[in-house]
């Protein structure tokens, strides 16, 4: 029996390609049914998220299913020539495929390491596969191993805590200062790479009320549409700042966008409602003396960078520990898979060993020893020796 996976992800593939090869729930069910009808003795799970599309398969070594078959299926199902995405495809087999799934499920292969969403997405994909009866004892065992591994990593490390990017630390700070960030109104100033990363972190944290303001309104509108949030024109920014609870700024500007004197006008309209400002821009968007204004809480990129570095060191230790847990569970699964692969041979060896044992016992208890009282004890001892020898043979075969 072999385990294989073929797929593509955010590390290897542009988003415009991933989007064309993605599956929604209905398409996933249809695809699994088609795969099962073509290869009725194989097992399949299809994982499709915004960051990856992967097909997992368990089948006999002699089965015709391989990486080319799986990528060919992706091509045929979506009507996209394989040449358009072949260079982005990766494929793993057996121990490497098992390690890949455990790493993905534990979020160590995610865009944001430690994000909990991927575990739920893997579970949902497995659930859909169970519903179509495209899984059997091998992928059942593998995916439950992946879920148990993820749970052990969460229990024994703090990998889900402590953001390692400045954007992540900024959102973490906001979460600490607001009792429920899901209810907070947030303004994101700037729609560059940092702004986009901020929006992703905010959405992942459950924040729903996000508005983007950018000097180029078209860029801000495009990003807002991409993440299903709001956007405003630049000349509406002051009005927005009078309403929100949190401002996270990363706009490219050679001069301060806001100084103490001008920002007091914004605060006047807020009627003493506190405002958290996180300034990640270089140069800064907010003049440092803005913090003199009552009810303003201002944090700069330097303060958050230090926290990010501390989190990164702790994360590195946690990742090393998580990888050790993954390796341990990969070995456990492969040992189990090995016993399944040599199962028929084990049964045959056991019968042969038992026959040899009985024959030698019969040869020993002849003549004057035929009715010896120690025969039962000798048979029990011989059986133990046979089982131990068989165990050594099995372990040596894995």
Image (spheres, helix red, strand yellow):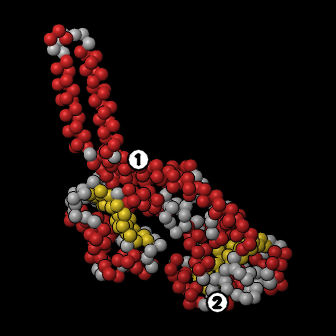
Is 267 placed above or below 149 here?
below
Q: Is residue 69 left or right of residue 178?
A: left
- Labels in figure, total: 2
Mark earlier in primary sequence (2, 1): 2
Residue pictured at 56% horizontal, 56% vertical: 320
Is 72 placed above or below 388 here?
below
User: Where is mark 2, residue-wise?
Assistant: 215
Q: Residues within 10 Å of mark 1 (few under 14, many from 20)?
A: few
Residue pictured at 45% horizontal, 79% vertical: 14
Kindly indicate whether the residue at mark 1 contacts the one at mark 2 (C-beta within 8 angstroms).
no
Residue pictured at 32% horizontal, 31% vertical: 388
Circle 1: element type: helix
Q: Quadrant location of residue 266?
A: bottom right
Which residue extends farthest left?
Answer: 367
Q: Is residue 130 left or right of residue 50?
A: left
Q: Nearer the viewer, mark 2 or mark 1?
A: 1
Could one spot residue 55 in this view of the protein?
A: yes
Q: Which mark is residue 304?
A: none
Circle 2: element type: loop
Residue 317 image position (x, y, % from top left):
60, 56
Q: Residues within 10 Å of mark 2 (few under 14, many from 20)?
A: some
**Quarter the N terminus occupies:** bottom left
Q: Residue 332 carries which label?
A: 1
Q: Quadrant location of residue 391?
A: top left
State the residue in front, 362 or 66: 362
Q: In this view, does 379 lie to the left or right of 194?
A: left
State how far apart marks 2 and 1 are (Cα): 55 Å
Could one spot residue 151 in this view of the protein?
A: no
State the residue in front, 67 or 303: 67
Residue 139 image position (x, y, % from top left):
33, 54
Residue pictured at 27% horizontal, 76% vertical: 76
Residue 48 image position (x, y, % from top left):
39, 68
């Amino acid at each position: 029996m072999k385990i294989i996976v073929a797929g593509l992800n955010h590390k290897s593939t542009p988003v415009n390609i991933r989007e064309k090869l993605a599956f929604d729930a209905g398409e996933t069910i249809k695809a699994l049914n088609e795969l099962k009808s073509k290869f009725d003795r194989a097992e399949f799970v299809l994982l499709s998220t915004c960051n990856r599309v992967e097909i997992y398969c368990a089948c006999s070594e002699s089965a015709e299913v391989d990486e080319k078959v799986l990528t060919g299926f992706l091509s045929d199902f979506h009507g996209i020539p394989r040449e358009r995405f072949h260079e982005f495809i990766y494929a793993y087999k057996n121990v490497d495929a098992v390690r890949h799934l455990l790493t993905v499920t534990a979020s160590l292969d995610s865009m944001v390491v430690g994000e909990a969403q991927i575990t739920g997405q893997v579970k949902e994909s497995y659930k859909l596969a169970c519903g179509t009866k495209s899984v059997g004892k091998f992928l059942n065992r593998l995916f439950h191993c992946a879920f148990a591994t993820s749970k052990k990593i969460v229990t024994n490390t703090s990998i889900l805590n402590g953001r390692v990017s400045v954007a992540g630390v900024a959102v973490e700070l906001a979460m600490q200062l607001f009792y429920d960030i899901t209810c907070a109104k947030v303004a994101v100033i700037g729609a560059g790479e940092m702004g986009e990363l901020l929006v992703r972190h905010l959405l992942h944290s459950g924040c729903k009320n996000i508005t983007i303001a950018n000097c180029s309104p078209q860029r801000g509108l495009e990003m807002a549409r991409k993440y299903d949030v709001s956007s405003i024109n630049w000349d509406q920014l002051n009005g927005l700042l009078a309403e929100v609870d949190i401002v996270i700024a990363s706009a490219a500007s050679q001069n301060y966008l806001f100084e103490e004197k001008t920002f007091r006008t914004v605060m006047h309209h807020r009627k003493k409602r506190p405002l958290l400002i996180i300034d990640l821009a270089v140069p800064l968007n907010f003049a440092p003396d803005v913090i003199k204004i009552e009810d303003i809480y201002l944090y700069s990129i330097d303060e958050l960078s230090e926290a990010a570095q501390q989190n990164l060191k702790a994360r590195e230790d946690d990742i090393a520990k998580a990888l050790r847990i993954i390796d341990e569970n990969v070995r456990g699964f492969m040992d189990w898979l090995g016993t399944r692969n040599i199962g028929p041979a084990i049964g045959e060896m056991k019968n042969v060993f038992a026959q040899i044992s009985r024959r030698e016992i019969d040869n020993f208890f002849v003549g004057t020893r035929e009715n010896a009282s120690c025969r039962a004890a000798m048979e029990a001892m011989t059986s133990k020796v046979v089982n131990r020898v068989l165990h050594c043979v099995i372990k040596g075969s894995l």
